Amino acid sequence: MDKLRKSKFWGSSRLLIFSFLMIILIGAGLLMLPQMTNGDSLTFIDALFTATSATCVTGLVVVDTGSKFTQLGQIVILILIQVGGLGIMTFSTFFIYLVIGRFSISDRDVLQDTLTQSPIKNIADLLRTIFLFVLSIELIGACLLAHCFWNQFPFGKACYYGLFHSISAFCNAGFALFQNSFMDYVADWKLNVVIMMLIILGGIGFIVLNELKSYFFSGKQRQVRALSFHSKLALIITAVLIIAGALIIFIFENGNAFQQQPFHAKVLASLFQSVTSRTAGFNTVDISILTNSSLFFIIILMMIGASPGSCGGGIKTTTAGVIVAMLFARFQNRDDVNIFHRRIPDEIVSKAISVTFFSILITISFIILLMVSEVEGISHQESRGLFLEIFFEVVSAFGTVGLSTGTTSGLSVIGKIVIIITMFIGRVGPLTVAFSIGKKDTPRFRYAQEKVLIG
């Protein structure tokens, strides 16, 4: 039974990777067409970078989305964002169900690996609920954002901008049609709140969204449909990260980037940067002028990322929660890892450690590669400050965040390829990539045990 389950996982992992690759290549081919851009057509590497960033809902760009792409090109990017955000396998399986009317066993395995680690009783109802709920949220967000843009743009353009940024925000993509993202709206509390709510809803995970819908709209059955342990953990950690992040960014930037802003704008900017740093990639302040302390703290937020089964990347909020709980348990010399009076299974703790370790290893590897490609042969004195910028860029790509200090557009071809691979691994997951290319055979024996001194 274990071998059968493992073989299914190997198959779903490779299928997920292959699906993302195909969509990215198709998107890159479309974006290279002359009618997709204003002026010269995109080179293959720039088209591939943009398609990867959109499909992996990252938001890093080598050309300005609003000015370089025609409306048709922007719509292609928006479709890539929507498909990549909700999950390619979720989309394809749902449409297969609409045509055939049933799910295969492999379809169930793929969806379970994509959406949740617990058994799904009724996949059709879950997918239908997810699609309707997501489209409803995006439509409401589009209407609210269009209202925010009405004073600045004609009705049709305001509606289009509202729809584009609503989907981009919910999918945590970070693509904006404004050259400086939302820096012109730093004090606009309506737009800030709408964007932040869309980012949060898109980043807490589809299973959590489904449970929240059932909890708040189930009427008398609310007591029966209580939130699961996973949902409570994801929501609490998300809230803690947002509040703590806003406070720390406010403290670090009160006398720097926020110095000229009124108090309410400082609060909005702190909250917005805290929310967007983990998943989305929009910004209302110039990231390049933030203090080193803020940049390093944002790196930590980007590394943690969103919640499992969501549009965002990173090691995930629940993974960070389990790692912190494990450290507390070890400091107290306890074997069991407990959270909210519940014991976390050893296999979950082991997976959290593996995800974190692989993520750090991949990040370090690509930081080295990017330093070699961008600053090779340059002394430390001449490249002062570039290490933090490269560090920031790689973590932003791996966490599928999209924030940048301005390094992206100036990358070499090799540097762009490094970031493309980083974005791809960050979206599909480091363990998924490792399992898909690793050895499948399970050893039939175990070596003799031996001890070694640690610490």
Image (cartoon, helix red, strand yellow):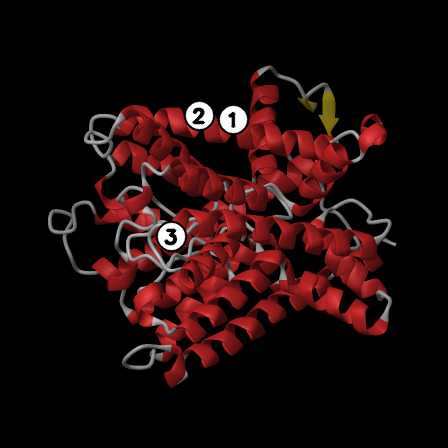
At numbered mark 1, what does the secondary structure look like: helix, strand or loop?
A: helix
The residue furthest top is 332
Percent coordinates x, y for residue 182 in the rendering: 34, 48
Amino acid type, residue under disc 1 in the picture: Val
Number of the label disc, if any, that sits on residue 39: none
Labels 2 and 1 touching (C-beta < 8 A): yes
Number of the label disc, if any, that sits on residue 240: 1
Q: What residue would you read off at disc 3?
A: 394
Which dot, 3 or 2, sits closer to the camera? Answer: 2
Residue 278 seen in this snapshot: no
Quadrant of the image for the N terminus? bottom right
Labels 3 and 2 touching (C-beta < 8 A): no
Percent coordinates x, y for residue 211 in the rendering: 73, 38
* Residue at the (32%, 57%) spot, across then down: 178
Q: Nearer the viewer, residue 43 or 300?
A: 43
Amino acid type, residue under disc 3 in the picture: Val
Percent coordinates x, y for residue 17 in the rendering: 60, 66
Labels 1 and 3 touching (C-beta < 8 A): no
Residue 246 seen in this snapshot: yes
Amino acid type, residue under disc 2 in the picture: Ala
User: In whole angstroms, how far apart are the C-alphas of marks 3 and 2?
Assistant: 23 Å
Q: What residue would you read off at disc 2?
A: 244
Residue 65 location, quadrant: bottom left
Which dot, 1 or 3, sits closer to the camera? Answer: 1
**What is the tally of numbered marks visible in this picture?**
3
At numbered mark 3, what does the secondary structure look like: helix, strand or loop?
A: helix
User: In whole angstroms, how far apart are the C-alphas of marks 1 and 3?
Assistant: 25 Å
At numbered mark 2, what does the secondary structure look like: helix, strand or loop?
A: helix
Residue 234 position (above or below residue 158): above
User: In whole angstroms, how far apart are the C-alphas of marks 2 and 1?
Assistant: 6 Å
Q: In this rendering, would 385 be left or right of 61?
A: left
Q: Nearer the viewer, residue 154 or 247?
A: 154
